[in-house]
Image (spheres, rainbow, N blue to C red):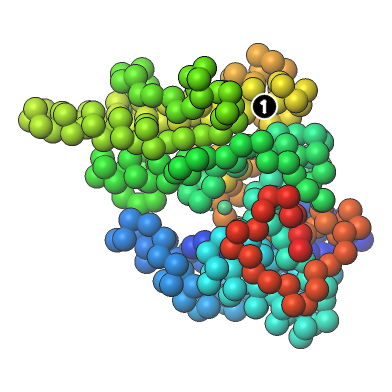
């Protein structure tokens, strides 16, 4: 609707420079510049390289977003920016840019939580989020289960990974199998030709003894080691590694744990909506398994399309829009970038 506020969102917490523009729940522009190719040969994101790339990309990406939406900065009602968590130097570029544009155009600025933005982005595709909801956020940097009772003011962490993030596990196993970085999409593709039941890999923190202290936590390091041992044993024996079967069995183990714990969180909290976000939410098996199992309990699964699951500016704009609509006050102009921003802080 034309009378809803026009919100611009800036994302620079990791390796994607994103600028998104929304009006209410309507996405008008989602401009993205990625430095992923510059990190590929290191097998992971190099913070200094990411910061430098953001610095070069931020102004052109901003201009592309404004052009795509057919608006000018003067038309924008508020600017939202990821203030954390993320890489300190990378966050600083976005926060400094947001402040600069806010001062120049006399606009309010909202420093927001990246993880809450991963939840909010779903509203662009599926409309307002029923609360309470459970959110499963799985990416290269985070793996968390959250109870979302009031997205504008705070979410309750239920659990998180105690070692690797889910996406990190995908990336490391891909590397082990000789697949490119980032490995998630390649494992996803390989797995389609493989048998998910070929190898029984471990499901981290699902044994009765672990559930008492870690009911909603994740651990992927044991799985990673198990896959590495299995592959090494084949190589030592001079046998070919069945890449598709390993990929499918690994992916099955990750998805089984993610979906199992997320649905347990829904059921024990009497929640009927599960939102999945973050780069790993693009995984085809995760999406299918979540929908299949959730249906048994009458739980509705909401997953944004893959392009909105990975880091982008639209998700920050979506959260900004929700904050404005909820009457939340803007941040102070000296808002800090906080690489360790807690989940209980939605905006600073
Ligand atoms: O949300 P995101 O773009 O950035 C972070 O905040 O980390 O997530 C990137 C992660 C990478 O680890 C990548 O391998 C993983 O998401 N990913 C996938 C898929 N697409 C991206 N993992 C599994 N299956 C996919 N289809
Ligand atoms: Zn992210």
Q: Position of residue 155 (x, y in %)?
A: 75, 44
Give left or right: position of 266 versus 129.
Answer: left
Q: Residue at x 69, y 75 (%)?
A: 98
Vertical side of 115 occupied by 98: above or below: below
Q: Position of residue 304 (x, y in %)?
A: 64, 42
Residue 7 visible (yes or no): yes
SS type, badge 1: helix
Q: Residues within 10 Å of mark 1 (few under 14, many from 20)?
A: many
Q: Residue at x 23, y 32 (%)?
A: 229
The residue under label 1 is 265
Compare residues 143 and 303 and report the one nearer the observer. Answer: 143
Q: Residue at x 73, y 50 (%)?
A: 344
The number of numbered badges drawn on the structure is: 1
Give left or right: position of 222 versus 78.
Answer: left
Vertical side of 292 occupied by 121: above or below: below
Compare residues 27 and 149 and report the one nearer the observer. Answer: 149
Compare residues 244 and 223 and report the one nearer the observer. Answer: 223
Q: Is mark 1 within 8 Å of ligand 2?
A: no
Q: Position of residue 273 (x, y in %)?
A: 73, 30
Compare residues 182 and 31 and report the one nearer the observer. Answer: 182
In the picture, the quarter occupied by the N terminus is bottom right
Vertical side of 67 occupied by 273: above or below: above
Vertical side of 145 occupied by 72: above or below: below
Q: Residue at x 40, y 41 (%)?
A: 169
């Amino acid at each position: 609707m034309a009378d809803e506020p026009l919100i611009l969102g800036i994302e620079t917490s990791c390796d994607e420079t994103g600028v998104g523009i929304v009006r209410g729940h309507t996405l008008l522009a989602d401009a993205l510049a990625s430095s992923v190719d510059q990190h590929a040969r290191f097998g992971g994101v190099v913070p200094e390289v990411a910061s430098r790339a953001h610095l070069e990309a931020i102004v052109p990406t901003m201009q592309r977003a404004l052009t795509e939406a057919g608006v000018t900065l003067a038309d924008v009602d508020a600017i939202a920016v990821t203030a954390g968590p993320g890489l300190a130097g990378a966050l600083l570029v976005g926060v400094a840019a947001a402040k600069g544009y806010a001062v120049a155009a006399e606009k309010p600025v909202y420093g927001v939580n990246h993880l809450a933005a991963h939840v909010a982005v779903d509203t662009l595709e599926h409309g307002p989020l029923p609360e309470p909801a459970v959110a499963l956020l799985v990416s290269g940097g985070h793996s968390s289960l959250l109870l979302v009772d009031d997205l504008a003011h705070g979410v309750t962490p239920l659990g998180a990974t105690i070692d690797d993030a889910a996406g990190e596990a995908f990336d490391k196993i891909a590397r082990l199998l000789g697949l490119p970085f980032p490995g998630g999409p390649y494992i996803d593709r390989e797995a389609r030709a493989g048998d998910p039941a070929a190898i029984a890999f471990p499901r981290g923190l699902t044994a009765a003894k672990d559930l008492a202290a870690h009911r909603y936590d994740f651990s992927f390091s044991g799985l990673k080691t198990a896959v590495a041992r299995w592959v090494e044993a084949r190589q030592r024996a001079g046998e070919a590694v069945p890449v598709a079967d390993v990929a499918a069995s690994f992916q099955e183990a990750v998805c089984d744990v993610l979906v199992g714990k997320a649905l347990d969180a829904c059921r024990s909290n009497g929640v009927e909506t599960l939102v999945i976000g973050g780069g790993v939410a693009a995984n085809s098996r995760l999406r299918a398994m979540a929908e299949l199992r959730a249906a048994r309990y009458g739980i509705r699964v909401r997953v944004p399309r893959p392009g909105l699951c990975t880091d982008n500016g639209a998700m920050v704009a979506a959260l900004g829009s929700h904050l404005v609509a909820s009457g939340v006050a803007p941040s102070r102009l000296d808002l800090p970038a906080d690489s360790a921003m807690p989940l209980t802080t939605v905006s600073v």
